[in-house]
Image (cartoon, helix red, strand yellow):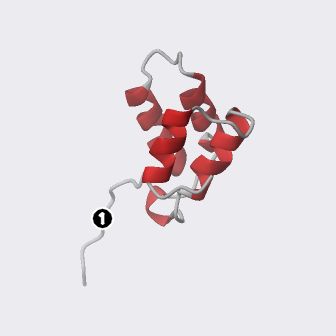
Amino acid sequence: MKPGNRETVPTVADVVREAAAICDPGGADAAVTALFESFEDDDRPATAAEDPRPRPARSTRLVFEGSPPQPLTEWLIARGVEL
């Protein structure tokens, strides 16, 4: 029998919260804050989450009302996100 593992798996919200803190430690960037807020109640295990690429596109459209800045658009497209 394989021994058990008591390691805690972070939730999607945990991962996004940590990423937001790394990217915007002062909490001044509205886009980072909006991204965090869109995931803050996501209690799924991070290892079980589906492909996350559609969520940034939804969040980007919502935050920027369908017109994100060109550098953000290019960054998302380079990572396979369709806007």
The residue lying furthest to the left in this view is 2
> In which image quadrant can residue 23 be found?
top left
Secondary element at image label 1: loop
Residue 8 or residue 52, whichever sits in front:
52
Residue drawn at (67%, 49%) of the image: 58
Residue 67 position in % (x across, y down): 68, 36
Q: Nearer the viewer, residue 38 or 44?
A: 38
Q: Residue furthest bottom?
A: 1
29 or 8, nearer to the observer: 29
Q: Residue 33 in the image: x percent, y percent?
A: 58, 28
Q: Residue at x 58, y 29 (%)?
A: 31
Q: Which residue is mark 1?
A: 5
Q: Amino acid at mark 1?
A: Asn
Q: Is residue 60 left or right of residue 49?
A: right
Residue beneath the point at 47% across and 56% down = 46
Q: Residue furthest front?
A: 70
Within 10 Å of disc 1 (Cα), the crowding (few <14, some 14-19, many 20+) is: few
- Picture quarter containing residue 32? top right
Above or below, 2 relative to 82 = below
**Residue 53 versus residue 34 in the image, above or below:** below
Q: Position of residue 77 (x, y in %)?
A: 50, 51
Q: What residue do we see at 61% from left, 39% from top?
A: 40
Quarter of the picture containing the N terminus is: bottom left
- In the figure, 35 relative to 2: above or below? above
Viewer-proximal residue among 39 and 56: 56
